[in-house]
Amino acid sequence: MTLILSACTNFYQVYSVADEHKTATDDRSMQFRTSDYLITYDMWANRGTLSFDLRNLSDQTMYVYLNESFIVDEGHAADFRQLRIVDHSLAFAGEVVAIPAGDYRHFTCPAIRRDIVELCHVDLCPSPQTVQTTSFTPETSPVHFGVKLTYSIGTDPAHKMVNNSFYVYEIVNYHKRNFEQCHDDTLRICDEMEILPVQDVRAPYKFYIEY
């Protein structure tokens, strides 16, 4: 594996992610919404990111319990205090994070994955003319991960659990030329519509590993 990768440069393994529950997805985020909260993810990054915004949709303060909230990687759970999860670059004080009604906090989480998946009969160093897609079910997927949050609302002592569980349903190895292909898209910047290049493969439910 090491010898093969040493011969590969400027390649990218791209992962498409699904969740076990129906999720609203637009061009910018995966969204999980209840009457209590809105959670938004954008996983697109080298090695991926589980960082997310948690918005309190209730009319009372929300309390998130860091030592009872977890990042799960292939069944292994590490709590937010162990992982030193922060708000952007600012450390959370104590074990409970308060979010006022209508406001949000950002949780900066670890990378999803550090090493590529080696797939049988799939070229790790494909030519620009070769695009091989490998698909998976939840049972056959080689990558499972998720976020579990414990929280309460206002003075209600009852603790509730958020369980966002994900799996990779598709993997594609790209030559740099294919990975960097873009198309023009019209986006609103302030009060004006502008045409900007957008990467073809980019999506909030995808991440990649450069190798």
Image (spheres, grey):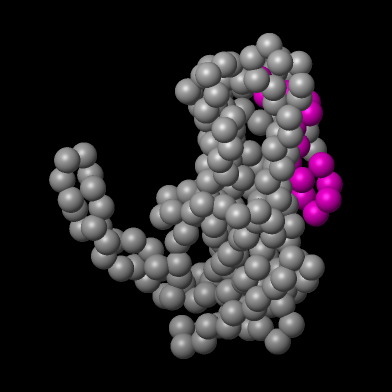
Residue 206 occupies which quadrant of the picture? bottom right
Look at 70% across and 87% down and name the residue there. 121
**Which region shows up in magenta?**
63-77
Look at 61% across and 60% down and name the residue there. 17
Identity of the residue furthest to the right in this view: 76
Asked if residue 183 is among those painted magenta in the image, a careful observer would answer: no
Image: 76 above or below 102: below
| Image coords of residue 189 (percent x, y) | 23, 44
Asked if residue 67 is among those painted magenta in the image, a careful observer would answer: yes
Image: 186 above or below 201: above
Residue 54, visible in the rendered structure: no
Look at 19% across and 53% down and name the residue there. 194
Look at 59% across and 30% down and name the residue there. 36
Judging depth in this view, the residue of 205 and 196 nearest the camera is 205
Main SS, magenta residues: strand
| Image coords of residue 71 (percent x, y) | 73, 41
> In screen coordinates, is 79 left or right of 176?
right
